[in-house]
Image (tube, rainbow, N blue to C red):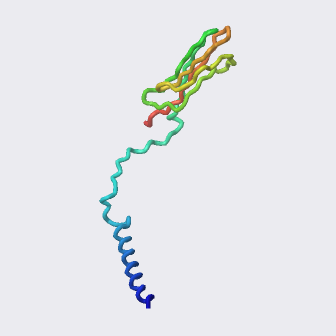
Amino acid sequence: MQFTRAIPLVAAGLFAGIALVLSCGDDSPHKADAAVCDCPTAEPPINAARIVQLEMPFTVPANDRGGAGAACPIDAVLLSGGCAAAVGQVPQIILEQSEPEGLGWHCDWRNPTNAPIEVRAIARCLKPAP
């Protein structure tokens, strides 16, 4: 007897559930509550032509300290940087500091030798999309 009373209640609950899902589902024709997308346009893909490496050569005097920096163009973004000896040299020089600075990369060296040594600061930059 209780089973026959429960059937109408279950059926009423089933119909109420279906009505609620259909009236509040995402497939409703009215999207008044949906936010309007005002996102900026997507960044174009990064390709090798947009990444540039700029180098600034510098001579550290004998038994002295010196520093140099390489800077990105105004509209570019600094990605990374570094400090290195001039190509082909095997110097005995001490790199004291290597860090980003403004739109570029700055390096400070100490030269404990009796000869000037050629070094370079390097900045790797991302140019804006054309």
Which quarter of the figure is the N terminus placed in? bottom left
Above or below — where is 65 with respect to 54? above
Residue 119 rendering spot, x and y as whole percentages? 61, 18
Residue 100 x/y as whole percent? 52, 26
Q: Is 90 left, or right, of 55 in this rendering?
A: right
Task: Say if 55 sits above or below 43 in the image.
Answer: above
In the picture as drawn, the residue positioned furthest to the bottom comes out as 1
The residue lying at 43 percent from left, 27 percent from top is: 74
- Residue 28 in percent (x, y) is at 34, 66
Taking the spot 47% from the left edge, 25% from the top edge, the residue there is 102
Tell me residue 113's x, y (percent).
68, 11
Number of numbered discs: 0
Of residues 19 and 39, the one drawn nearer to the viewer in this rendering: 19
Tell me if residue 61 comes above or below residue 13 in the rendering. Answer: above
Q: In the displayed image of the protein, which residue is found farthest to the front?
A: 2
Task: Name the quadrant of the C terminus.
Answer: top left
Give me the residue at 52% from left, 39% from top. Answer: 47
